[in-house]
Amino acid sequence: MSAAAGTAPRPSVLEALHEEEALGKAYDARLLRRLWRWVAAYRGQVALTLLLVAPMFVLEIAPAWIVKTGIDRVIAPAVHGAAPAAPGGWADRLFVPPTGLPTLVWLGLLYLVAMSAGAALQYAQSVVMSKTGQAAMRDLRKDVFVQVQRLHLGFFDRYPVGRLVTRATNDVENVAEMFSAGIVALVTDLLKMLGFAVVLFLVQPKLAAVTFLVVPFLAFCAVVFRLRVRDAFRAVRVRIARINAALQETVTGMKVVQLFTREERNLRDFARLNADHRDAWFLSIRYDAALFSVVEMAQGICVGIILWAGSGLVAAGTLYVFIDWMRRFFQPLRDLSAKYSVMQSSMASCERIFQLLDTAPAVLDPPRAARPARAAAPARRGDVEFDHVSFGYAAGDLVLRDLAFRVEPGEKVAFVGATGAGKSSVIKLLERFYDPQSGRILLDGQDLRELPQAELRRRVALVLQDVFLFAGSIAENLRLGRSDLDDAALERAARAVEAHRFIERLPQGYATEVRERGANLSAGQRQLLSFARALLHGADVLVLDEATSSIDTETEALIQKALRVLWQGKTALVIAHRLSTIQDVDRIYVLHKGRIVEVGRHEELLARRGVYHRLYHLQYQAEERRATG
């Protein structure tokens, strides 16, 4: 349906893809400050994660020092035929064995304890970090879901469902990954690298200074890598987005694909997209491999420097310590590519999530203080009035122009007109999916903008042509969460609208499970269920939008009988393309280009030989041609 016909324009596929493919900064302080709102509740766990860094670092440097002690105190003297060396500094004295226990056995036990304790702390930190991330993201995902339900229904006319689902699933998961493999790990790695640099300088400043001459070269390589790999990651995301779009289009249009034998053409197109994605990954892999190789080369150079420059400065055990700690210093740099990718993806996901959370609903309930005082028990009648209403989905492009009419309580009126005349827009305004640009819409004399939306939706029931049913039983779809509706009430409503007969023939009756969107029920059966649902929830005003336009004649007769029960004692507004179904209403409004051009009963409008007469005879002739084949 066009915008003029009642649907706001959707963004193009390219615009949607561009938003999904966007990459953020690897670090954005503004986004992290906003994200802290969800993490703050778990600040104790975050603090614990960071506090564990110190003991983990001690346990990480301990094994090399234990080996150094064994080399200097036992192995080196034995090689040179000298007496075992006495403990030197305070660190060596920590590893003096108990009386009677061989030094190497004692050092082996200490090594095993240090490795086991380090592994246990690493496990504890990973668990705490992951649990913190998942707990915070559970709260964030809940807030995203709450925000989606707060947004006005007009928002969903222009925002693709797939992107909304992505916000609450993939994007939130990306942010959660930042805790386990992103920012916390990055901070931990930086602290460890700083710690290794400090202890190396404490052990032997001259050797450490010579060794770290290679660090500026690594920093330069890291900057180049960051600039190049961003484009590579973006290319990968662009191509996977195109693959997803192609898959979605093919699956959604599978009926057309098979009817017109497009399988080979679709396969060729998909193979091309798949190859492009593979090539993009190859480029990313080359950059990753290049960084890994540079880090390995720098590490090898450092080991060579240590062996060359340190042989005359330090003992063999100290050389071992330098080599081990220097390898551990370079370890985080090997994982830089993965962490950088995680951080970029997480920042982009944060940006998109906050963009959704910052979207203000265009339709809001009035503040309690601004609501007009009403009687304790107001009489609910169902009086509907459009008071010179003008409305458009886009600025300067009006769909309804100065629309004015009134429907008295209990009256049945219909709206007809060509596609794009504004019929559906009337219904959307009455349900307050949108607010008009000018004029007022009144329900029992009260402006809809002064009514809470929940109260409005209780008083105005909408029955659509495309009936939505949730996964669950027939009974659950009738109750829609209301606990005050017992089984007897469900059956009375179903009998009243002719739905009980087909329900009792189902395998489990009212307990029969409904498949996704009611796929195991016919269009007529779904329509009757929607009537029963509307009757159960007791609205004053009944709105039927194309409620009988896509069913067979026999089912239509059944539905017309159900309708008479459904709208008994209610104000009813009907939109129908089948003009034969609205001949008994009290009044018909004929819309043309957003204006009411004719008003009257069926016979009166035919006698005028105007727009309604033309529409009726065009439809009659079309139906006659279909009947004669």
Image: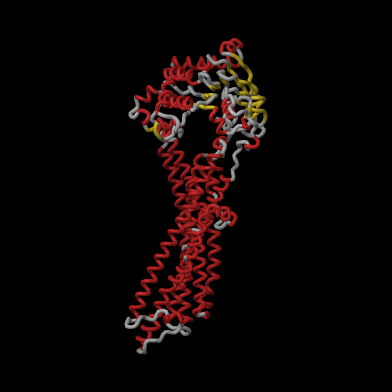
Residue 230 in the image, given as x and y percentages of width and height? 53, 56
- Residue, x 55% and y 27% (percent of image)? 460
The N terminus lies in quadrant: top right
Depth order, front residue of 420/91: 91
Residue 353 in the image, given as x and y percentages of width and height? 54, 47
What colouring method underlies this structural image? secondary structure
- Residue, x 36% and y 80% (percent of image)? 97
Q: Residue pushed farthest front?
A: 376
The C terminus lies in quadrant: top left
Residue 414 in the image, given as x and y percentages of width and height? 56, 19
Q: Residue pushed farthest bottom?
A: 82
Depth order, front residue of 561/321: 561
Q: How many marks?
A: 0
Depth order, front residue of 616/129: 129
Q: Is residue 306 above or below residue 335?
A: below
Q: Is residue 192 visible?
A: yes
Q: Is residue 468 above or below residue 334?
A: above
Q: Is residue 296 visible?
A: no
Res 125 → quadrant: bottom left
- Residue, x 55% and y 62% (percent of image)? 224
Residue 617 in the image, given as x and y percentages of width and height? 54, 14
